[in-house]
Amino acid sequence: MELGERFVPYDALADVMLEPGARGRVVLRVVPREGADPVMSAATGQLQESLDPYRLVLPAASETLAGQYAEEMRAALSERGPAERFLIAGPSVPRSFQAWDGEAAFDGQAVTFTWFSSSASPAKYAAGDQRYPISEIEGVDWHALEDARGSFRLRIRGHQALSNPNNDPASVVFGIGWGATHHSLPFAAAVLAAAQGPKAELPSRM
């Protein structure tokens, strides 16, 4: 995914483990606390193992050293229960991606949906392009592209979402080649992080 370098403090982690991998390799895996990372919160358990940003696949020769790191990191963990706020910063903005029926863009202040005349539903096209200030967004629903279906939907404060995302002007739908996880999930996480807002200062890099 296009997440780039991320700063993950110890207090954002629930566990660290070393596991056997395929073809004789080993996997160093850290588990973030529930609610600590906007990326994993947006993904809601839908990420394939190969896309998990907390898995590091290593050659078997690194098993001893990786095991030592895992033990040291595990010993540094204290609170492992659900986090009350995001402890890991969301993906950088601005960012955008193209879905099947329109383009989604987020500049840190608002999400805009610009419909494609060739593929947007009549309901969306009639509603026109949409702009949702972050102050109106209370959450997101991201559904990974699977069997040529998937969607990204904004939960707008005070509005009931339509059951069909194809007709909901607060959502874009995915298709084969449109709305891929490595584009749409970081976008969803960035919006979620901004919408919920930090209740306290996020840790910064020194």
Image (cartoon, helix red, strand yellow):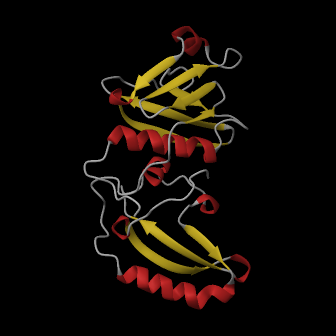
User: Residue at (36%, 37%) from the top-left corner?
Assistant: 195
Task: Tell me residue 71's x, y (percent).
Answer: 44, 86
Question: In this view of the protein, which residue sits in the foreground, 26 or 204?
Answer: 204
Residue furthest out toward the front: 206
Residue with the most extreme top position: 126
Foreground residue, 196 or 151? 196
Residue 158 position by quadrant = top left
Counting from the top left corner in percent of width and height, residue 63 is at: 61, 87
The quarter in which the C terminus is drawn is: bottom left
Instruction: Examine the rendered structure and indicate whether residue 205 appears above or below residue 125.
Output: below
Name the residue at 50% across, 49% down.
43
Image location (x, y in percent) of residue 68: 50, 88
Image-quadrant location for residue 37: bottom left
Q: Residue at x 28, y 53 (%)?
A: 201
Towards the viewer: 120 or 110: 110
Q: Can you say whether 126 is above or below 71 in the image? A: above
The reply, left or right, for residue 177 in relation to residue 189 is right
Q: Is residue 156 left or right of residue 118?
A: left
What residue lies at 46% left-to-right and 47% top-to-bottom?
Answer: 42
> Is the residue 80 above or below the residue 175 in the image?
below
Q: Residue 154 at what x, y percent from top left?
A: 44, 31
Give the total of numbered labels: 0
